[in-house]
Amino acid sequence: MQRPDLPASAAGPAVRTGGCLCGALRFTVAGQPVDPHVCGCAHCVRRSGSPFQWWTAFPLAGLSWTGEHGEPTWYDTHPGRARRGFCSRCGSHVAALDHGDPVEVGILVTALDDHGVDPALTPLNPNRLTEAAPWIAPAPTRHQVPVDVHLLLRREGPDGPEVLLSRRAGAVYATGLLHAPSGHVDGPHEDAVRALIREAGEETGVAVDPADVVHAVTVHHRSPGGAARIGLVFEVRRWRGEPAVMEPDLCDAMGWYPLADLPAGMVAYCRAALDAYRDGHRFAVHFQEPGDAVAFDPAADRLRTLPTPCTEAEAGGPDPAVREFTEQAVGRIASWTDVSWARPGSRVWRATGTEGGQWYVKIHRGVRFHRREVDACVRVVIDHIRTACRWKPWNSSGAVEGADGLQSSGGDAN
């Protein structure tokens, strides 16, 4: 894929401005806030002279220093780990930045020009408030995390299953890396399936019916910056329309990739979800460590999967390879019933489709038995056709007489 030039106006989903008290230090940040919280740790308290400070993170790629001072003066509050930025003229603290190769920048919400009624900036969690001010009553809140929805569009390619990946672009997290089309559940008014369908239309232009949305895997993820989230990955094999880039300020390309041979340059979070899905797992933990790269690194693969019990649809059914083969041929299967005879080396299942219909799936003892039964099935089908069309009987060579353009020989059926 070629990365096209982005227009200069592409700035991401939101742009905010801010600065210090005297105005010499100014900045803009693009992108959505990550993990807004209030903190009362010793460093925040001593630097500010206040019982706590109000922080949030933004994608570092979306930060620009625009004032006459340029960048702030940095002080290592955690030597070797993190530093805080302030204005050398008025002393206002505005930012925090980890050492190494950070992907996010901490911004004091009170340094933003507009930090009024904005749900995206509302603190989710208090951090160590009572250490600095024991008189502050503990906030009656529980741990909360964002819920992501990931669209796993799947089709059959020449070499097996393929999935759709898009390349992130602009002032967003993980820009330049491949990721499944995804987004967030917007709030308590929106369920995860509706969120997925909305994101599918917004990002790829395809229309998805709720009946075609199937849960694939759930991932509990923590980024290298420490923020955690729940990712719900949904498989979709039927949709309307052709996938295309619909948000060029957030994505500059998309394409189909083999599930068995995923490309380099993927977001580690997404790669972990697809690896778990490909291997048949339905729940995974992907907690990255500080210093881990956002891009997938095989040497620092943090994926941990949990065993998955058989569902009712899979109980008594064949192994995954046979189930996959069957669904490729006839569509999704709702349940399996073992109807095998008491004959060694041969297995038979009755498969019931999610939209009705039944099929029989059989594993033969060997090639000879397989060919013999296929030949018999072909004869039965053609005999039904002959009867329905009132064709002539079979001739001595095993072919149907009077069937224009149609012949079947018992010995060559496959």
Image (cartoon, helix red, strand yellow):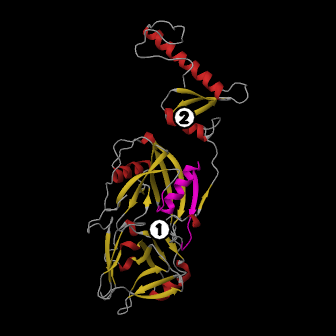
Q: Nearer the viewer, residue 378 or 19?
A: 378
Is any atom of residue 287 visible in this view? Answer: yes
Q: Give the quarter of the figure containing the N terminus.
A: bottom left
- Residue 10 position, x and y percent, is 29, 66
**Is 251 a magenta residue?**
no
Q: Quadrant of residue 289?
A: bottom right
Type of amino acid under label 1: Leu
Kindly identify which residue carries mark 1. Answer: 124
Q: Quadrant of residue 67?
A: bottom left
Label at residue 256? none
Q: Nearer the viewer, residue 412 or 75?
A: 412
Q: Quadrant of residue 315?
A: top right
For image coordinates 51% across by 26% down, the residue present is 357
- Residue 336 position, x and y percent, is 60, 32
For image coordinates 36% across by 85% down, the residue present is 71
Label at residue 326? 2
Is any atom of residue 313 visible in this view? Answer: no
Mark 2–mark 1 distance (CA, rounded to whole Å): 46 Å
Report the span colored magenta.
Answer: 263-291
Q: Nearer the viewer, residue 375 or 190?
A: 375
